[in-house]
Amino acid sequence: MIKIPVEQILAQLLNFSLLIVILFFALRKKIIQLFWDRRQSYDSALTRAQSARQKAETQHAQIKQQLESLNATAGGCLDKAKSEAAQLRAQILAEADGLSQRLRQDAQRTVQVELERAKRELAEELLLRSLDSAHEILKEKLKDSDQKRLQSEFVEKIQVVRP
């Protein structure tokens, strides 16, 4: 082991202490300013962080409120859409019912018209057949003398009607 004299240690300790004191007095303002600036920087960063936090909380509250509003509106819109769909369905059913009634009435009128036309045609055909039958019967049963007599009676009646 090496022995170092105590005077040498005390001299080095004194030199070191003097160096610290000189540095302290020489750099004291700069060190204080450095720590002061650093504190100001931290305070400023803290203020900005608090401001940003408040702003974020405010925006969060606004977004939450808007989301709740949208959820409430969505429910209302869904209810409104369901209501409008029910009304539209009822309206369409009413229109379809009215249309089917009109179609039934038109069909009934068409059946009536066609029935009347068929009756008329049947009556006309029956009348024509009756006339043809009567003509054939009269041809067979009427003789020349009867025909001349009917013609002369017809002429006489026409002359009586004419003044």
Image: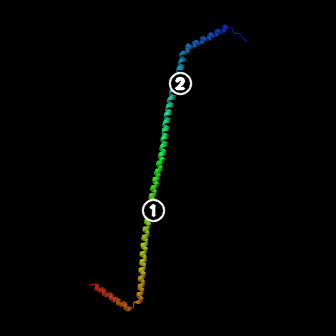
When asked about the image quadrant of residue 150, the answer is bottom left
Q: Residue furthest right?
A: 1
In front of the other: 32 or 82: 82
Badge 1 crowding class, 10 Å Cα cut-off, few under 14, some 14 to 19, many 20 or more, is few
Front disc: 2 or 1: 1
Q: Residue at x 28, y 86 (%)?
A: 160
In the rendered image, residue 56, in percent from the top left (x then y), is placed at 50, 33
Dot 2 or dot 1, earlier in sequence: 2
In front of the other: 39 or 25: 39
Task: Report, in whole angstroms, how far the alpha carbon at label 2 lies from the one at label 1.
Answer: 84 Å
Q: Residue at x 38, y 91 (%)?
A: 144
In front of the other: 61 or 149: 61
Q: Give the residue number, with chain letter if any, for mark 1.
A: 100
Q: Residue at x 62, y 10 (%)?
A: 15
Q: Give the residue number, with chain letter if any, for mark 2.
A: 42
In the rendered image, residue 83, in percent from the top left (x then y), is placed at 46, 50
